[in-house]
Image (cartoon, rainbow, N blue to C red):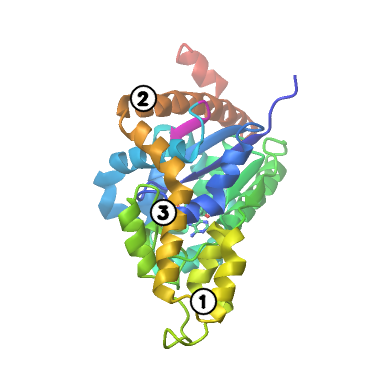
Amino acid sequence: MQHKKRILTGDRPTGQLHLGHYVGTLKNRVRLQDDYDCFFIIADLQMLTDHLEEYASIEGNVFEVMCDYLGVGLRPENTFFVQSQVPELAELTMYFSFLVTLARLQRNPTVKDEAKTYGVTSMSYGFLGYPVSQAADILAFKADLIPIGQDQLPHVEQTREIVRSFNRIFDKEVFVLPQPLVGEVPILVGTDGDNKMSKSLDNFIAFAHSPQETERRILNMVTDHKRAYRKDPGHPDECFTFRYWSIFSPSDTPLVCRECESATRGCKECKTQLAIKLNDYLVEIRERRQQYASQPDLVWDILATGTRRARVVAAETLAEVREAMKISFPQLLMKGGK
Ligand code: ATP
Ligand code: MG
């Protein structure tokens, strides 16, 4: 039997997932889950790169992310796991750290951007090196396809470089080159109209938000800077809110566009309508999410099963890696009575 190809992707447990995750990567995951063997990592150690002081919220956030995953329609049979509970990943990160230069890490555009956005002025060793740890997360499972938002592309490129270096230096084809897959909206801008929608910037609409909260956030969105008065014709192409219409309710865009340009629709009513559409879009996801959130035992069970499976697969890869690196020490294993 031909084995299914493998997917590895995931999220940091910095809070609840949002629409940016949905159009950037989650939708792809839902679509592909039948055809691929899917591994979904909740990257709690990666969260510590810039949220160290929030360490006490990791467990609660992991639960929220799991509810979001199951809510959007990822099935419990997929392999969901917690990064810190698979220590082989930390080990592999260590080995890979010798294959990447400091200059290469400092050139990573996403790391640079994040450092700027979150104001990390004196970057930790772990922050600068997190793309290496991400490479370990991908390669420990020998994943073929990586569904991600555009901001993660430099990390997949870094991973591919590590594959080439490792296989060349240790003279063995241990790893295969993973391919990235970016979602239909590579970067969804948040409700502030300026930055990538992000948990850390509070410019997001989460699956866990209530319809009222969603409406409040939409009503605060910027619209068309050029339209000073209700009677002025609008410019949909330059309106931030209109972009949301085209992403989340494309069939309405011709009407919205006409009414905006002829000033028969005001910005406030436009946003109220958009909130209704978005809430409709999210009804099913929110219902399913709520069902799981009310059964924490079941959710932790799914995560425990996945984490056990992830450890088995990662341990197999690590055995191969140590062997290729000539650090498997069979003599010592024998003495240890293994
Ligand atoms: P944080 O603020 O904690 O960094 P985040 O919202 O940026 O959180 P991540 O956990 O860093 O989320 O990203 C998880 C995945 O979701 C990545 O594949 C990323 O590319 C994708 N993603 C996150 N935000 C967006 C967005 N606004 N548009 C498109 N894709 C996104
Ligand atoms: Mg991020």
Quadrant in the rendering for residue 66: top left
Image coordinates for residue 75, horizontal then vertical, percent: 51, 30
Is residue 96 visible from the viewing direction of this image? no
The amino acid pointed to by label 2 is Leu
Q: Name the residue under label 1.
A: 239
Dot label at residue 298: 2
Most extreme residue toward the top is: 337
Left or right of 2 in this view: 245: left
327 up-or-down from 188: above or below: above
Q: Nearer the viewer, residue 149 or 322?
A: 149
Is residue 40 visible from the viewing direction of this image? yes
Dot label at residue 126: 3
> From the viewer's perspective, is the residue at label 1 or at label 3 nearer?
1
What is the total number of numbered labels drawn onto the structure image? 3
93 up-or-down from 302: above or below: below
Give me the residue at 47% from left, 27% from top: 306
Q: Earlier in the sequence, mark 3 or mark 2?
A: 3
- Categorize mark 1 by other alpha carbons within 10 Å: few (<14), some (14-19), many (20+): some
- Residue 291, magenta (yes or no): no
Image coordinates for residue 99, horizontal then vertical, percent: 59, 50
Image coordinates for residue 331, horizontal then vertical, percent: 54, 19
Mark 1 and mark 2 residues within 8 Å of each other at the beta carbon: no
The magenta stretch is 77-82
- Categorize mark 2 by other alpha carbons within 10 Å: few (<14), some (14-19), many (20+): few
User: What distance separates the C-alpha of mark 1 from that of mark 3?
Assistant: 39 Å
Give me the residue at 55% from left, 81% from top: 262
